[in-house]
Image: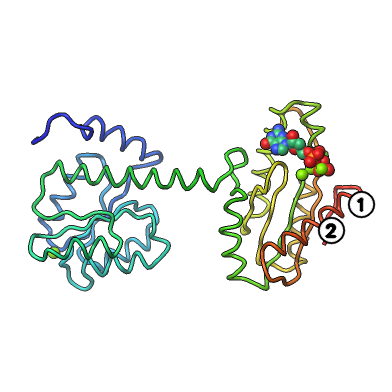
Amino acid sequence: YIIKDSRYSFNHVIKVIERLNKNQGIKVLVAEDSSTSRLFIKILLEQYRFKVIEAENGQEALAKLEADSDISMLITDHNMPLVNGYDLVRMLRHNSRFQDLVIIGLSAEGDNALSAKFIKAGANDFLKKPFYHEEFHCRVIHNLEAQEMLETIRDLANIDPLTKLKNRRYLFDEGERFFRKNSPNVSLAMLDLDNFKRVNDTYGHVVGDQLLEAVGSEIKASFPDVLAFRFGGEEFCIIASVGEQELQGLLNSFSLKMRSKELTEAKVLITCSVGVCCRPVTSLEESIRIADANLYEAKRLGRDQIVS
Ligand code: GH3
Ligand code: MG
Ligand code: MG
Ligand code: MG
Ligand code: MG
């Protein structure tokens, strides 16, 4: 080792990898046409317990990435047959599916502009061959940690920690995109738990929280292919590209389940009121406004019902 004490000590690296390897080993795809070079990188990665998958050219790399969504990182050479490393990076970054893939470019010295090209195309990092093992390991860990942090921050910004549903902030982001893509075939429903304050007052906030958490899971299970958000407090929003009848069907079976199920140890039964907007509108905001007015009407009519 050229540097003995550092943040990237073997122990640190192992700790990071164990944290990142929550389920199984982190999968890394090595795209490199030289078998010697490929084997060398494979050994460096396996030293640190990565699961290595190999590709001999850019085309094979692309096919393997498309077939396996568990691959977290790509280490790619530039000069390869069929599709070179630079073109591979460009193709990947044009596909939103691969936005979280960590990409490290590799190439033998020569063209000085190559690292700039890789980074501009969207690679996270670039290494010139030959390199020190330590630099290789540091860059691999550094980039994986940065990606992990990015995903954590994104989840913190978009996901409600109690119900694990997307939050209101994300509704106006993802919902808006969904709306633009699917309009006018968009249905929206606002759900509000009935007399929820009473649950808190009778059983306490802890049970109230448990109930909200259980409702969140129930919403996830009942509306598998739609966008579901915690709009706030005990209000939820469902957005789907389905017709009124289909949405009504889903909502009815959800209401039924809620009414018949003791969702917490305190055996609380709860109902909800729902306002729906299925007519073509010009914006997400308008759709929410209409659903909200219908929700208000459902409350006025005595709760535990759907108004569209
Ligand atoms: P309504 O049928 O008119 O909707 O009556 P409600 O009691 O459900 O409505 P209200 O708006 O009066 O009260 C909502 C309650 O939801 C009050 C608030 O304490 C509770 N609440 C909101 N967020 C949370 C939460 O995160 N945890 C718990 N335990 N309670 C919450
Ligand atoms: Mg090559
Ligand atoms: Mg409310
Ligand atoms: Mg309520
Ligand atoms: Mg109220």
Image location of residue 61, percent across then percent down: 27, 63
Give me the residue at 60% from left, 47% from top: 165
Q: Identify residue for label 2.
A: 307
What is the quadrant of residue 244 in the picture? Answer: bottom right
Where does ligand 4 appear, by image quarter?
top right
Is residue 262 visible to the viewer in this orientation of the structure?
no
Amino acid type indicated by mark 2? Val
| Horizontal side, residue 73 vs residue 196: left or right | left
Q: In this picture, is 200 found above or below 159?
A: above
**Badge number at residue 190:** none
Give me the residue at 84% from left, 52% from top: 296
Judge the density around disc 2: few (<14), some (14-19), many (≥20) Cα neighbours within 10 Å.
many
Do labels 2 and 1 touch, CB within 8 Å?
Answer: yes
Q: In this picture, is 119 found above or below 84?
A: above
Of 209 and 118, which appears nearest the observer?
118
| Horizontal side, residue 177 vs residue 18: left or right | right
Could you tell me which quadrant the N terminus lies in?
A: top left
Q: Identify residue for label 1.
A: 301
User: What whole-number distance in Å separates the C-alpha atoms at marks 2 and 1?
Assistant: 9 Å
Q: In this picture, is 151 found above or below 280?
A: above
Is residue 102 visible to the viewer in this orientation of the structure?
yes
Judge the density around disc 1: few (<14), some (14-19), many (≥20) Cα neighbours within 10 Å.
few
Does the numbered disc 1 mark a residue whose Cβ is under 8 Å from ligand 1?
no
Amino acid type indicated by mark 1? Leu
Task: Tell me the SS state at disc 1.
Answer: loop
